[in-house]
Structure formats: structure tokens, C-alpha cells
Amino acid sequence: MIRLEKRPQPSGIWNAAAPVLAVLLTMVFGGLLFAALGNDPVEAIRTIFWDPLFGQFASFSRPQLLVKGGPLILIAVGLALGFRAGIWNIGAEGQYILGAICGAAVGLAFYPSEAWWLIYPLMIVAGALGGFLWAMIPGLLKVRFGTNEILVSLMLVYVAEQLLASMALGALRNPEGMGFPGSRNLAQHAGTANPEVIAGTGMHLGVATAFIVVILGYILLSRHLLGFHIRLTGESPRAAAFAGVNPGRLILICLGVSGALAGMAGLFEVTGPAAQISIDFNVGYGFTAIIVAFLGRLNPIGILLAGLLMALTYVGGEVASLMLGLPAAAIQLFQGMLLFFLLAVDVLTNYRIRIGRREVV
Amino acid sequence: MDLSAINPVVLVASLMVAATPILLAAVGELVVERAGVLNLGVEGMMITGAVCGFIVAVTTGSPLLGFVGAALGGALLSVLFGVLTQFLLSNQVATGLALTLFGLGLSALLGQGYVGVKSPTLSPVDLGPLSDLPVVGPILFAQDIIVYASLLLVAGVWAFLKFSRFGLILRAVGENHDAAHALGYHVIRVRMLAIMFGGACAGLGGGYLSLVRVPQWTEGMTAGAGWIALAIVVFASWRPWRLVLGAYLFGGVAVLQLNLQAAGIKVPVEILSMSPYLATILVLVIISVGRAPGSLGKPFHASG
């Protein structure tokens, strides 16, 4: 008989090994999935995981890794703070949209000024503020009325999507765009562009910010009192109350920080890779970031690696859909599978598997 | 704008159709939560049900078989959630989210060849003279059978939880799983059954969307309906009859805003499209007083 026995302490080894095992399992089962779709599994896995890094067109796809990974990491670090404390902000997609809208609105208000040094910092602040305020809605409602932040933050994603459509068709539409929906191109205008820090690497300001946030997040969680309060609240809310943690304040801080980071990610995206406010501006980074946060063990350094891996599946998925005709949805499924395997393997972190009958004392 | 174009009888009749998918998903989730499990994957199970139901209905030509397929699809996906949370003791919130992400991807993949295909759909029942009655006829006696089935299901769940012995066990497991375990009840078995029932109901709700309400398959067509169902369970304070009120209230907002759009009211379309989601938030704010089942969301591990 197989049974589980709770470990006195979570296993450090399994904590680190679980994501690796989950990735391997996902590759195996993903391969089976691709085989079922009529592709050569080995070739499909190689196209997704190897070719973007070392293949024929790697010089094009490598920068994309940072471009896609940047927003994922930026959002996921913020989410991880809340997840650690048991505060579930799953509306990062909405905060990401609001950040893009607010930031773009500020940038467009200054059009056609090219004073980059003045406008762009203002846009970053506006983007962060937009995401922050959008996240404050579930935060304040939870603190004041005890509403469920999961549901409210998620509902606000759909509201934000409608708001985005209204902005792309109305207030922020390009007046010289011949009536087509979508704002002016922000990336090609000197005052509002998000340039690459190092040319040709894909490392734009947002990616640089993401790296800085990883370091700050790591210091916060491991060295700062606030980080201790966050971890304590997650592991034992009762102990946290005795330690003098104000739960309402913690909820607002966690939601606020994650909202602001998601908003900044939106701003960097709209001024860089996406280039304009359009109806289909958001592509699900806010949701994929949830997978990234868990895959990175809710630890900023882990999130950095997980974000790059997830970016690899995005880039590889695009290559695979071009070269092999693999449907885009298969990649989405693949990413969901990864989270499932991680959650399944995670049992080994907290429990031991014992085989044999339980002794009766 | 011409508000007189909106016929209140048609409005009420169609709000019942709009509310049915959410009511079905919500009644399933209510049972799951009364058993002490929080499954946030309703959206994923719904959309999987929607695509499975659609595929079965198109292949067999029978919408009723489609509904069977939808329920099976939802239940199968929920087994995945059950195994992870009940046997491998994973975090229920995270697993539910994973289920939603997985379901959205799975459904998009399965439904690839079915975009734009027309499916057979259910016709309303014909009760002869009853259906021809003014006002009450179209509202009460000319719906399709799933609308009636959903109300029967609510009644059944209510009676099951209130009067049956197994319902009592299920509630005991949800209120305090350690006590229920000590009494010799199989906590995990009860929860697995509840989770599968919830999955089947969510699948049915999704099937109703793709087979009757829309009736077509498009990617991501549930558009948050599963999440709204979760919100309605909270709104109903875990009591079956109040689900009906919540779902019909939501259906009313959804249908009214569509009618207002069609009538050309001077409010931007986007604001109207937001209204069901805003209404859900509002409802959550007003009613967050109900007491959740005692063991809701907590993992159970018999460590004795």
C-alpha cells in the first residue's frame, strides 16, 4: 500500500527539483500530445526548446526571449508577493491593460513633443499608477467589505478589456489613422519610445526594470521586515496577527505592488513591442505570469528562470507553428500542462511516499 | 433610441436562457463547495464542456447527446482537479487556476476544426395551448428542456442537501473534515464525487452556451461565465434557491444590456458590455455576509 507521510520540514531538495521534474514530464507528455496531432514529437520538442536558442534563426529569436520574458517576470514577481501571503490577485491582465492605457494617454497628451527625458518617466509613473489604482479596487473592497479578491480582480479583467476597446476606438484613436482603430504608434515617436538598452539584444527598458525588480523582490522577501510579514501571513495568519501584522495593510500593499508592476509591464509593452493601444493589445501575459510565479516557486530568482523558460515556449511555439504547422492552442495547452505537473510533483516537497502497511502502535 | 422596441415578455423569456448556463455551473460548484472543496476551474470545465458538447452534437446530429458529451467532458476534466487536490494534496486555488488555463487551451485545440460550423440546436418544448397563453406562455411554457432541467436540478440539490442522509454526510465533510473522518466517513471519496458532479454541471452549462445560447463554437466563448458562477455561489451564501435569484439577476443584466445596444441607447457599447461584470462586483460587495462551509479550501490528510 502506498501512502503519504507529512515531512516535518518541506524538503529543500525537492523544492528545487520539482520544477525541473515538471518540465521533463511536460516534455514527455507534450511530445505525446504533438504525436497525437500528427507531428514528430522529438522534432516538435526540439523546435520549441532548442531551435530558438541554437537553431538556424537563433539570432532573430534570442532577443525575443527577453522581449517576451520581461513582462512575464515583472508581473510574476508582484503576484508572487501576494501569493506568498495568501492574497490572490489573478486580475493582473486587467492591471496590465490599465497601465498601458494610462501611460499611453499621458504620452499622447504631450504629442508631438520629443522631450523624452521628461515624458517617458511621467508615462512610467502613470502606467504604474493605472495598474495600482485598478488593483486597489479589489483591495479596498476586500478590506472594507470582505469581498473575494479573486473574483473581483478577475471581473475587472473583462471590464478593462472593454475599456481598452473603447479607448482604441475613441479617446486614444490616432486622429491621422484614417478612422482605423488604434492609437498613434508610440514606439516610433521619439518622445514616447521604449528603446533597447543594448541594441540588438531585445533588452528594452522594461526588461531592465524586470531584472532590477527581481533583485529588489529577493531582498524584500529574504531581508526586509515586510517580506517576513508576507511569508508569516501565508504560513500562519494567526501567528502573524500575534506578531502585529495588520492584515488589511498587507492586502493593500500586496495588491498595490503587483498592480503597479503589472501596470508598468503594460506601459513598457505598449511603448515597445506592441507599439500602440489596439483592441487586441493584451495577449494573456497577466495569466501566463501566474504559471511563471508558481513555476518559480514564488521566489524572485526562480521567477527569473521560469519567466525565461516560459518565454522560450512562446517563441518556440511561434517557430513550431510556422515550421511544423503546430496550432497555437497546443502551446497554450502545453503551458497549462506544465503548471499541472508542477502542482502534482510538488507533493514530494511536503510529503514522503511510504510503501508498505502502516504499523499499528 | 426606441425603448418601446424592448418587449418585457421576450426579455424575461430570454433572460432565463441567458441565466441557464451560469445556473447550471453554479449549482454544481455549490455542491463542491458544500463538500469543502474550492474549485476555481469552473471556467475551464465550462469551456471544455462547451467544445465537447458541440463536437458530439455536430458529429451525431443530436443536441441531447451533445449535452451528455458536455457533461462527460466537464466531469473528466474535474477528475484531474480531484486527483491533484485530494490525492496529491496540491493547493486548491492554484490547481483551480491551472484547470482554467488548461481548459482554455484544450478547448481551443479541440475546437479548431469546428469554428463557423453550425450545430443542431434544441427547440423549445411545445405544450400546445399552454405555450400560447399570453405573457406566461412564452416565459413558463415555451422554453427548451434544459431550462426546466436546470431548475429541477436546483430543486434536487436542495432536497438532497436538506433531506437525504448522503447530503448530511456531504455537509459534515464540508463543515469539519476531521470530525467526519473520525466518524468513519470517507472524506476523499465524498469529495471526489462532489467534484465530478460539479464538473458535469459546469460542462452542461458550457454545452448550453455552445448548443443553445449562441449556438456556435468560438474560442474563449464562455467569457467569464464560469467566474460569474463562482461569484453567484458566494452571493447565494451557499443556499441552492438563492442561486436561481442570482443567476436570473445576472441574466437580466446581460439580456437588458444587449437589448439596449440593439435599441441604440446613447451609452457607449463598451460601457453596456461591461455592465454584467460590474453588476457581479456590485452584488459581491452588497452580499458578502454568508458563512462559508467550515473546511472550504483546506486540504485533508488523514495523518492518524
Image (cartoon, coloured by chain):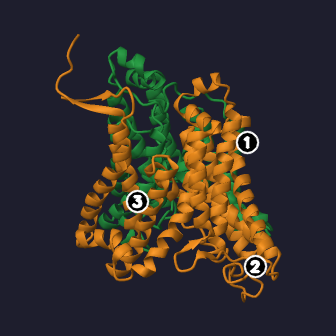
Q: Chain of mark 3?
A: A
- The mark closer to the camera, 1 or 2, is 2
Q: What is the CA distance from the residue labelled 1 to the residue labelled 2?
A: 35 Å
Pinpoint residue B34: horizontal percent, then vertical percent.
48, 30
Q: Where does the C terminus of chain B fall, quadrant-wise?
A: top left
Q: Chain of mark 2?
A: A
Residue A214: name its quadrant: bottom right
Q: What is the CA distance from the residue labelled 2 to the residue labelled 3?
A: 37 Å
Q: Which residue is mark 3?
A: A335
Pinpoint residue A66: horizontal percent, then vertical percent.
51, 69
- For mark 3, does the 10 Å Cα neighbourhood hold few (<14), some (14 to 19), or many (20 or more) residues? many
Q: In the image, which lettered chain appears orange?
A: A
Element at label 2? loop
Q: In the image, which lettered chain appears green?
A: B
Q: Which residue is mark 1?
A: A140
Q: Chain of mark 1?
A: A
Please name the amino acid that badge 2 sits on: Gly
- For mark 2, does the 10 Å Cα neighbourhood hold few (<14), some (14 to 19), or many (20 or more) residues? many
Q: Which residue is mark 2?
A: A191
For the view shown, which residue lies furthest in the top direction?
A361
Element at label 1? helix
User: Counting residues from the N terminus, which is met first, the one under dot 1 or under dot 2?
Assistant: 1
Pinpoint residue B84: horizontal percent, then vertical percent.
35, 41
Q: Is residue A122 above or below residue B86?
A: below
User: Counting residues from the N terminus, which is met first, the one under dot 2 or under dot 3?
Assistant: 2
Residue A97: name its quadrant: bottom right
Q: What is the CA distance from the residue labelled 1 to the residue labelled 3?
A: 32 Å
Comparing A296 with A356, the one in front is A296
- The mark closer to the camera, 2 or 3, is 2
Please name the amino acid that badge 1 sits on: Leu
Element at label 3? helix
